[in-house]
Image (spheres, rainbow, N blue to C red):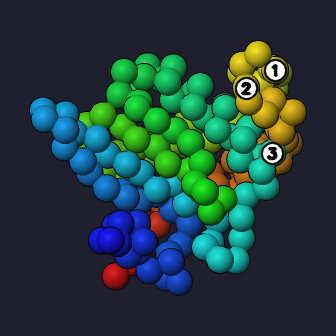
Amino acid sequence: MKKIESFTVNHIKLKKGVYVSRIDHYGAETLTTFDIRMKLPNSEMLENGSIHTLEHLIATFVRNDDEFKSSIAYFGPMGCLTGMYLIVNGAYTSKQILPLLIRAFEFVSTFEGEIPGASEIECGNYKLHNLEGAKQEALAYLDVLKNATDENLNYPE
């Protein structure tokens, strides 16, 4: 089998950041997949409850964002627990998506109240949430987003 593109990225050199993972074309539609890398590969990972809460809060936020709500196709966790994927309808760069991500992670960092979609009726693992952990992860990642340089926005060679 042909190796998929994400497995060709040098994870040894990969830093925390936001990367265009792929751009796909389906007829007239273009989808951009972002690698939202919150942890250093093979040395750090997100805790399950925190990543689950981040997923619920950020997916809800981006699907309600005035600028992007009609363009969001998907937001969810990576299997390796080092970040998230965001799929957006349209061709975007990492720099163009930064303001949305900053708004989303700021929202999580100060969130108080009930986690959206976190009831037994709405979620397949509703007890697996960690709001305080999600807020701490959001604050840490905001520092990356707000200070992003080219090495945080473009995959390493």
Q: Nearer the viewer, residue 137 or 106?
A: 137
Q: What residue is disc 1 on?
A: 120
Q: Which mark is residue 123?
A: 2
Kindly indicate whether the residue at mark 1 contacts the one at mark 3 (C-beta within 8 angstroms). no
Q: Residue at x 49, y 82 (%)?
A: 13
Q: Between marks 3 and 2, how big is the CA–CA gap? A: 13 Å
Q: Is residue 144 left or right of residue 151?
A: right
Q: Residue at x 66, y 59 (%)?
A: 81
* Residue 128 appears in the rendering: yes
SS at badge 2: loop
Instruction: Indicate the position of residue 74 as horizontal and vertical percent values.
Output: 46, 35
Query: Is 93 rendered above or below residue 115?
Result: below
Report which quarter residue 150 is drawn in: bottom left
Under mark 1, the amino acid is Glu
Report which quarter residue 125 is drawn in: top right
SS at badge 1: loop
How many C-alpha atoms fall within 10 Å of the one at disc 2: few (<14), some, or many (≥20)?
A: few
Q: What residue is disc 3 on?
A: 49
Q: Residue furthest top?
A: 121
How many C-alpha atoms fall within 10 Å of the one at disc 1: few (<14), some, or many (≥20)?
A: few
Under mark 2, the amino acid is Cys
Instruction: Indicate the position of residue 7 as horizontal and vertical percent values.
Output: 42, 72
Q: Which mark is residue 152?
A: none
Report which quarter residue 56 is drawn in: top right
Q: Residue furthest left?
A: 28
Closer to viewer: mark 3 or mark 1: 1
Q: Between marks 3 and 1, how big is the CA–CA gap? A: 15 Å
Q: Residue furthest front?
A: 1
Which quarter of the figure is the C terminus placed in? bottom left
Kindly indicate whether the residue at mark 1 contacts the one at mark 2 (C-beta within 8 angstroms). yes
Q: Nearer the viewer, residue 151 or 88?
A: 88
Label whose residue precedes the other's in the sequence (3 or 2): 3
